[in-house]
Amino acid sequence: MQLTLTTFLSVDGVMQGPGGPNEDRSDGFDRGGWLVPHFDEDMGEFMGEVFDKADAFLLGRRTYDIFAASWPKVTDPDDPIAGRLNTLPKYVASRTVDSANWHNTTIIKGDVAAEVTRLKEQLGRELQVHGSGTLARTLIANDLIDEFRVIISPVIVGAGRRLFADAGVATGLRLVDSRTTGSGTAIHVYQRTGRPEFGEVELG
């Protein structure tokens, strides 16, 4: 399976608490809900396309808890997002959780990179990561993400956790899709190409 990451970002790279003021207040974050004014029909259509490709989900504990508290309440099997989240296999990476009640959930403990490598060897289309910042940074550091889908809202949040670490692995990317929604959100899809090349600008 291909491992893909889909995440909402602000222009300044914040990924914390996009969906509401109380979604994630950890570390004193009080600027949640910055995505909401920009979520429109175009973005909903893109997210439907994303979830339609999923054969399994890989989530960090915090994102898993947020999803598990809301999506099981959406019982329409034809809902393009809930219909998949509620039925397809879900893997949650956590050192503290021992059990999970959401249908078809498996807890990953120990070496996350090794377990994710094993999952990628299974047959299927996509193992999808949504949000899950801490997990995403671990996967990026181990060159495990094949495709990045970054959804950039036209807002500078100014505080909060960011997707990319201050110091990380240099990674080359190829742009394979780009679109802009009616609300001004920029959606970019990149595939990993390996290590980037570096050069020097020559003047004259």
Image (spheres, grey):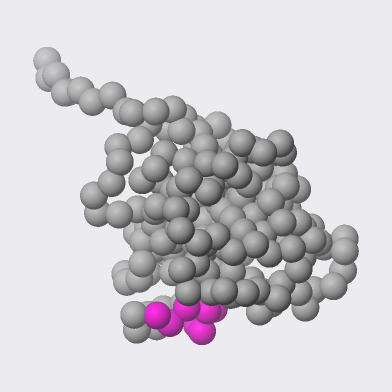
State the residue at coordinates (43%, 82%): 25
State the residue at coordinates (44%, 27%): 193
State the residue at coordinates (87%, 69%): 76
* Span highlighted in magenta in the image: 17-26
Q: Give x and y (percent) for residue 180.
A: 57, 47
Examine the residues drawn in magenta and state their main secondary structure.
loop
Q: Is residue 4 left or right of residue 194?
A: right
Identify the image quadrant of the N terminus.
top right
State the residue at coordinates (72%, 56%): 89
Task: Tell me if residue 101 comes above or below residue 154 in the rendering.
Answer: below
Residue 38 in view, yes or no: no
Task: Tell me if residue 94 comes above or below residue 89 in the rendering.
Answer: below
Residue 20 placement: quadrant: bottom right
Q: Give x and y (percent) for residue 91.
A: 62, 59
Q: Give x and y (percent) for residue 13.
A: 37, 58
Q: Is residue 164 left or right of residue 24?
A: left
Looking at this view, is 74 or 3 the one in front? Answer: 3
